[in-house]
């Protein structure tokens, strides 16, 4: 499968392009970016063409790997799907439900395959954890991701600065808690210091989970942990933050398999849309101070 990378930032270079260039079966066929000069420079690093015209790139590939801000990704995903290209998207797929719905509608209408790169979902440890969770009568769960963006390649990201940890790392929390505990039907939310948020999620199964997210803690406070609990005790997941290229390689394999088999991947744009709906509900709950039903 021939892939075009849409995006020229750190993640596009360090993960998307790097994984595709080294992939034994997929081919990195070109790079497009909003800044043509940066697209040419990134493409030159990997000895592929750089494109100033996104439609020209779409004409030359079978699939796109998108590493762009969510509000930029969503309309380009629609455009790529309408051109018949398979989609490997970043999370969140959009910053509002209406935009996410347009992506889903375009993918379904075109009959293309889609995978959203929720990094943890493409790691063996997570698959094992979810298998164990499925064998357990669960009573609830919790997640905590405390981080500091200061000094990282993401510190200058405008959309992360504007939307904070809720929209950036909230999708990762949902990507593991929702398959373990079921769809979220309502959200309560409270704000902490700076961009820190605390969520109480009520799941369709009747269980509840709590999530704490922050990009603005002191570096010595950083850490990440998820767990669910039930009749078999507590099942703890400690995701690997150091192997995104390996996880992305798995995502490429699974998108290719979905494209060949014609199936729907568990992390397709439909699941990505549901994650956006929960995040939008959490944002409303933060504003209103009330428990908010998802989809209201």
Image: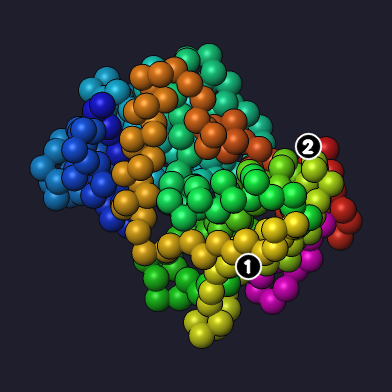
Residue 190 pos. (x, y %): 79, 66
Residue at screen point 52% across, 37% down: 267
* Cα distance in 3D space between marks 2 and 1: 25 Å
- Quickly name the residue at label 1: 144
CA neighbours of label 1 inside 10 A, class few (<14), some (14 to 19), many (20+): some
Residue at screen point 26% across, 47% down: 19
Q: Would you say residue 272 sits in the magenta stretch? A: no
Residue at screen point 46% across, 55% down: 125
Q: Is residue 170 left or right of residue 37?
A: right
Which corner quadrant of the image does residue 94 belong to? top right
Mark closer to the observer (2, 1): 1
Q: Is residue 241 visible?
A: yes
View extreme (left): residue: 47
Q: Secondary structure at mark 2?
A: loop
Q: Is residue 255 left or right of residue 271?
A: left
CA neighbours of label 2 inside 10 A, class few (<14), some (14 to 19), many (20+): few
Asked if 138 appears above or below 265 in the picture, the reply is: below
Asked if 161 appears above or below 267 in the picture, the reply is: below
Which region of the structure is painted magenta? 188-197
Q: Is residue 211 visible?
A: no
- Quick one: 124 or 88, which is closer to the camera? 124
- Quick one: 136 or 265, which is closer to the camera? 136
Residue 296 pos. (x, y %): 83, 38
Residue at screen point 87% across, 53% down: 291
Q: Would you say residue 193 sits in the magenta stretch? A: yes
Asked if 137 appears above or below 153 in the picture, the reply is: above
Query: Which disc is residue 295 wearing?
Result: 2
Q: Is residue 255 left or right of residue 212?
A: left
Which quadrant holds the N terminus?
Answer: top left
Q: Secondary structure at mark 1?
A: strand
Residue 138 pos. (x, y %): 74, 52
Visual colour scheme: rainbow
């Amino acid at each position: 499968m021939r892939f075009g990378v849409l995006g020229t930032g750190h993640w596009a270079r360090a993960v998307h392009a790097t994984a595709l260039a080294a992939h034994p079966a997929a081919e990195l066929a070109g790079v497009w970016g909003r800044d043509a000069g940066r697209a040419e420079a990134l493409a030159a690093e990997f000895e592929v063409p750089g494109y100033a015209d996104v439609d020209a790139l779409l004409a030359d590939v079978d699939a796109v790997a998108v590493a762009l801000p969510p509000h930029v990704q969503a309309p380009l995903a629609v455009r790529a799907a309408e051109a018949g290209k398979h989609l490997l998207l970043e999370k969140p797929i959009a910053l509002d439900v209406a935009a996410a719905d347009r992506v889903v509608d375009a993918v379904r209408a075109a009959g293309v395959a889609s995978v959203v790169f929720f990094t943890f979902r493409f790691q063996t440890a997570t698959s094992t954890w979810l298998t164990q969770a499925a064998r357990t009568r669960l009573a609830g769960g919790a997640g905590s991701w405390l981080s500091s963006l200061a000094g990282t390649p993401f510190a200058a990201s405008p959309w992360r600065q504007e939307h904070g940890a809720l929209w950036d790392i909230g999708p990762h929390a949902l990507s593991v808690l929702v398959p373990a505990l079921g769809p979220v039907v309502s959200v309560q939310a409270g704000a902490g210091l700076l961009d820190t948020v605390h969520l109480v999620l009520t799941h369709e199964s009747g269980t509840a989970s709590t999530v704490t997210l922050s990009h603005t803690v002191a570096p010595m406070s950083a850490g990440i942990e998820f767990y669910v609990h039930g009749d078999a005790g507590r099942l703890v997941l400690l995701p690997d933050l150091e192997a995104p290229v390996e996880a992305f390689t798995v995502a490429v394999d699974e998108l290719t398999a979905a494209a060949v088999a014609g199936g729907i991947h568990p992390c397709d744009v439909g699941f990505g849309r549901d994650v956006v709906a929960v995040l939008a509900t959490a944002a409303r709950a933060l504003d209103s101070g009330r428990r908010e039903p998802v989809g209201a």
